[in-house]
Amino acid sequence: MINIMIPGADELMFRNLVLDFNGTLAVDGKLLEGVADKLNALSSSLDIHVVTADTFGNVKVQMKKVKCKIKILDETDQQLQKLGYIAQLGNDSVVAIGNGKNDALMLKHAALGICMIQKEGASQESMMAADVICNNILDALDMLTNPLRLKATLRK
Ligand SMILES: [Mg+2]
C-alpha cells in the first residue's frame, strides 16, 4: 500500500496500479526501456494490473518479466470494461494510468488518474478526466515513489 496525504483533500491509500499498455507502457507495441524495472520495484507496494485492448497482440510476451496481472479486453465498449475492472478492485484503491479515449472513465473514477502523453499522444477526453498529466511513464511511476511530487501538484 502507498499512503499519500494531500493538503485539502482526502488521504489517498493505493493498493492497485492499473495501467493501459499501448501509448502508456509501450510505443508501437514495445515495452519502453526502464519500465519493467520500475514496475517490479513498485510491485512490493502495489498490485499491478495491465488492462488493454492488446492492439499488437503481444502484451503477454512484452510483460513476461513484470510481476503483474494482464486483462485483455474484447472489442466492445472498452471504456466500460476498464471502468468495471477498477470497480471490482475498489475505485478508491486504484491509481490508473492511461492515454487513450478508452481510458477516460477509469482515469476519472480511480482515486488518482494519470494521463500520459509520450509519443502516441493523449486523447482530449482522457486529459480532461485525469488528475495529473505526465509526459513520460517513468516520471509518472516515480511520482508514486516520491509522494512529495504528487503532493506539490495536487495540493489546493
Ligand atoms: Mg493507450
Image (cartoon, rainbow, N blue to C red):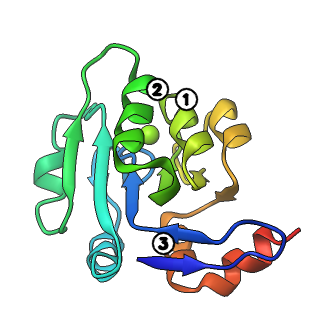
User: From where the camera sits, is residue 94 visible?
Assistant: no
Pointer 2: residues within 10 angstroms few (<14), some, or many (20+)? some
What residue is disc 1 on? 101
Residue at 32 percent of width and 72 percent of height: 39
Left or right for 131, reference 137? right
Mark 3 CB within 8 Å of ligand 1:
no
Left or right for 80, reference 42? right
| Outermost residue to the right | 156
Which kind of residue does numbered mark 3 sit on? Leu
Q: Image height check: is 73 above or below 2?
A: above
| Outermost residue to the top | 76
Q: Quadrant of the C terminus?
A: bottom right
Which kind of residue does numbered mark 1 sit on? Lys
Secondary structure type for disc 2: helix
- Alpha carbon distance from label 2 to label 1: 8 Å
Q: Are marks 2 and 1 in contact (CB under 8 Å)?
A: yes
Pointer 1: residues within 10 angstroms few (<14), some, or many (20+)? some
What residue is disc 3 on? 141
Where does residue 21 sit, x and y in percent of width and height?
Answer: 35, 47
